[in-house]
Image: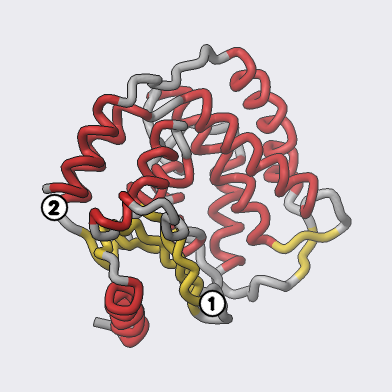
Amino acid sequence: MRDIEKEISKKLDEIEEKEGVRILHAVESGSRAWGFASPDSDYDVRFVYVRPKEDYLRLDEPRDVIEWQLDEVLDINGWDLKKALRQFSKGNATLFEWSGSTIVYRTTSDWKKIQEVSRQYFSEKAAVYHYYGTANSTFQGYLLGDTVRYKKYFYALRPLLAARYIEKYHAAPPVLFDDLLKLDMPQGLKAAIDELLEIKKKTIEREENPHMLVIRSFIEAEIARQKEIADALPDDHNKDWTALNTIFREMIYG
């Protein structure tokens, strides 16, 4: 195990001991999980935990998040099980990404049960709106200037490709950017992305570069297209709480 993985495992042990919780699932999120980390990217560790059943019967319930560490190397925080299940009910795309991350630091058989239940609550409309919003925020905030940090392209490209995946397969998209690149895409875009990936491997996150017009034009057009798609999608949220309530009780009471 690499030193950083040992350090993360140690931090997770500390959280369980000092917070009195049991971690059900801990993963890498963000650029490392997506597969396009820069040489100086930090580690974004996200986890879901459960407290002893007595804590869920208190009038003064504990906070439903644990914000453990944030520095230049490690960003570690997690959600309580109740919060996570409520977010699954809303079709929270970020939580589905945690669940689908291929970089897993810790997991349990209980999480596999939760993961099975969560699939009933994936919402195409919620996910496409999320990915459209992420791409649009990146475009408006970082891609309108004369130069660009190339990593910002990926923060728009990946959500747009994720939305295209949903459009084609009607399912939660894969987390890895390489898997999304298997989708059909406009002529010239794949070659431009491959070139961008090679450049990015050698540049630091804050380096400013000239725009790649093929990529920028695709992002601008696809943002508009995905907004139209999201607006037209029917509300497909699963409003039946039965499965979530059942798995919550099983995790709390056994």
In the image, residue 213 sits, relative to residue 186, either above or below, namely: below
Coloring basis for residues = secondary structure
Q: Is mark 2 on a helix, strand or loop?
A: helix
Q: Of 197 and 24, which appears nearest the observer?
A: 24
Q: Mark 1 points at which residue?
A: 39
- Residue 109, numbered circle: 2
Residue drawn at x 77%, y 65% is: 209
**Residue 55 placed where, x, y %?**
31, 57
Q: Of 187 and 106, which appears nearest the observer?
A: 106
- Spatial CA distance of label 1 from label 2 is 34 Å
Q: In the rendered image, which quarter is residue 86 located in?
A: top left
Q: How many marks?
A: 2
Judged left or right of residue 13, residue 200 is right
Q: Which residue lies furthest to the right in this view?
A: 146
Q: In the rendered image, which quarter is residue 29 located in?
A: bottom left
- Number of other residues with Cα within 10 Å of mark 2, as a class: few under 14, some 14 to 19, many 20 or more: few
Q: Can residue 189 be seen in this view?
A: yes
Residue drawn at x 48%, y 46% is: 94
Return the disc, 1 or 2, that comes first in the chain's sequence: 1
Q: What element carries label 1?
A: loop
**Residue 215 placed where, x, y %?**
68, 45
Residue drawn at x 25%, y 41% is: 248
**Residue 129 placed where, x, y %?**
59, 30
Q: In which quarter of the image is the N terminus?
A: bottom left
In the image, residue 224 sits, relative to residue 54, either above or below, namely: above
Q: Of 103 and 118, which appears nearest the observer?
A: 118
Judged left or right of residue 84, residue 207 is right
